[in-house]
Image (cartoon, rainbow, N blue to C red):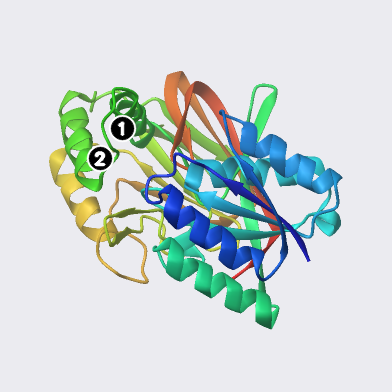
Amino acid sequence: MRAMLLVNPKATTTNSRRRDVLIRALGAAVDLTVEETAYRGHAAALAGTACEKGYDVVAILGGDGTINEAVNGLVDAVGPESRPALIVIPGGSANVFARALGLPNDPVEATGAVLEALREGRRRSVGLGQAIWEDQSRYFTFCSGLGFDAEVIRAVEGLRGAGRKATPARYVNTALRHYMATDKRHPAMTLTGPGIPTEEGIFMGIISNVSPWSYVGTRPVAPTPWASFETGLDLLGLKRMGLVSMTSLIRQVLTERDTLPAGRHLVQLHDEPEFTLTADRPMAFELDGDYLGERESVTFRSTPNALQVLV
């Protein structure tokens, strides 16, 4: 089995010694080629090259951003029947996709689980979400969002650019500061879609391809607890941003439960093939935890059985 391993040398939770150990372990199981990512978008280009050269597997050692790039490179390069299988080894700060697959958050333990899957031939078919705006589109593995959550991610990315680490505490503190400055009186978004009642007056929208949607340290964040890789997309929209409403919602999404969050101010969708959020002003937009600028309209579409993952 020929495999290309894409390594992000700046991955948060690995160092050169640990990476060498993981590479040797994988190299003992497959015919391995190692490529380091060097710039934004490089993982997508390398994954496309792996498709062109007929690799059986693309493995990724990195965080959710590197995984997202590689997944987009795979999906854009060839059809589902020709795509290499995917191996994920978590190396970032959150590792939402890897954890959603059931992998350990530690890269060494995750490598052991992946090697076991290789020996036993275990594969899992997963669906993706696709965000479409203007003349562009991009796939996501676990989440996207318009509004407040994307604004927080934008702020944290600014702090990371200044040399600060993206810790769970930093996300929480940034979210609290940002909430205090947020306009809580003028919702901007409208939800539309095939067979979906139109909903106006939405402040923010969280779109999920799986649950949990994110993590605060070890605590899962589950605004859409029914979302999964085997179903369509889920949505949680907020029509109020007051303190009482937000406190109730936060308590619910941080509590392990199999029921949807309760509240008359919530807009919720489950297992939908497609819907659109349109805003009357530019809104911050994120995808798999990566800030992608401001948008006024984004269509979200489910792509079933897009990838085979060794897990």
**Left or right of 222 on screen, residue 46:** right
Residue 217 visible in image: yes
Observer-nearest residue: 99 or 251?
99
Question: Residue 225: horizontal and vertical position, in percent?
Answer: 41, 63
Observer-nearest residue: 173 or 27?
27
| Mark 1 to mark 2 CA distance (whole Å) | 7 Å
Taking the spot 52% from the left edge, 42% from the top edge, the residue there is 8
Question: Residue 303: horizontal and vertical position, in percent?
Answer: 69, 52
* Residue type (three-letter) at the residue carrying disc 1: Val
Observer-nearest residue: 274 or 47?
47
Q: Depth-wise, is mark 1 or mark 2 nearer the camera?
A: 2
- Residue 171's disc number: 2
Tag 1–tag 2 contact (CB < 8 Å): yes
* Residue type (three-letter) at the residue carrying disc 2: Tyr
- Residue 152's disc number: 1
Question: Residue furthest toward the bottom?
Answer: 120
